[in-house]
Amino acid sequence: MREGGPRVSQPDMEEPHRRALHRQQDLRGLPFPLGDWTEPAERLEELYRWAEESALGTVEWYLASRVWKRRGARALRMGAALFATAGAALVLVDFKWAYAALLLAAVCVGLDRCFGLTSGWMRDVAAAQAVQRRLEALRFDWSSESVREVLGPAEGTAAEASERCLTVLRRFSEDISELVRTETADWMVDFRAGSGPLRTQSVVPWPSPRPDGGTVSRFPLGQAGRPNMPRQRPPEGPRAS
């Protein structure tokens, strides 16, 4: 390793206090570590641990969120399948019970779509896998920087090496934040899908003022191309003498 350069290493992932940080109820970021840059190697390692802990906490949050959604989605889908099968079998026996069973099957499907259980389950799994892929890429990038410092040719200064490491961490944090933001935006669109038309109809745009500052006439103007002409009296016949 070049003397005076930053020393980057792969931190241990099995520390108890780090695992305790992952058990959080809400998806919120960890506080940014503030330290002394007189020891750049220790500082970079601390920042790497912070980025890795944040990513692991995000993965665990999505994996924990998918559990109850998966159970609810499977229960509703199983109920819909059972009620639909029962309704199809009861058509020839009792039409009323068949209609009730088919109605319950439709209710199960509607509840699944209303609460977004299946779609939320799929989004949580996709988000967790995406974060894991980015975390694996970060580990390989960090390892390549470590190999460059230990075995690679001496190129650049210690400040440039530190800047490369910070760029890797910053790009990773931005990717994770953008991924969470996109998933949250998709959830908001899915959640507001049912109330969108009602909200659009209830909102009335405020009339904008006239550019010339004039007042609006009380009576509407006539249609274009058809001017309002004064009504004329019909010609009177000759008076009887």
Image (tube, helix red, strand yellow):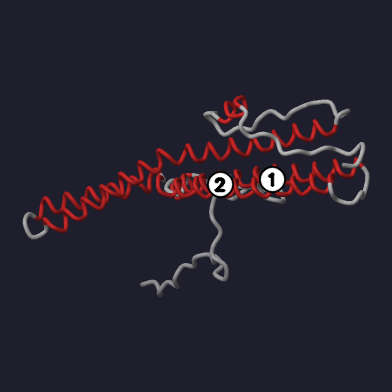
**Residue pushed farthest left?**
93
* Nearer-the-camera pick, 98 or 43: 43
* Nearer-the-camera pick, 152 or 57: 152
Question: Which one is closest to the eye, mark 2 or mark 1?
Answer: 1
- Residue 161 picture location, percent across and down: 86, 44
Numbered disc 1: secondary structure: helix
Which corner quadrant holds the N terminus?
top right
Q: Quadrant of residue 228?
A: bottom right
* Nearer-the-camera pick, 176 or 217: 176
Q: Name the N-terminal-most of marks 2 and 1.
A: 1
- Residue 43 picture location, percent across and down: 80, 31
Tell me how many marks there are. 2
Q: Which mark is residue 139?
A: 1
Horizontal placement of 205 versus 101: left or right?
right
- Distance Cα–Cα, label 2 vs label 1: 23 Å
- Residue 223 picture location, percent across and down: 54, 65
For the point 40% across and 38% down, the residue is: 68
Number of other residues with Cα within 10 Å of mark 2, as a class: few under 14, some 14 to 19, many 20 or more: some
Which corner quadrant holds the C terminus?
bottom left
Image height of 192 relative to 33, above or below: below
- Residue 148 picture location, percent across and down: 83, 48
| Mark 2 residue type | Glu
Q: Quadrant of residue 3?
A: top right
Say if mark 2 contacts mark 1, CB within 8 Å.
no
Q: Which residue is mark 2?
A: 183
Number of other residues with Cα within 10 Å of mark 1, as a class: few under 14, some 14 to 19, many 20 or more: some
Numbered disc 2: secondary structure: helix
| Mark 1 residue type | Arg
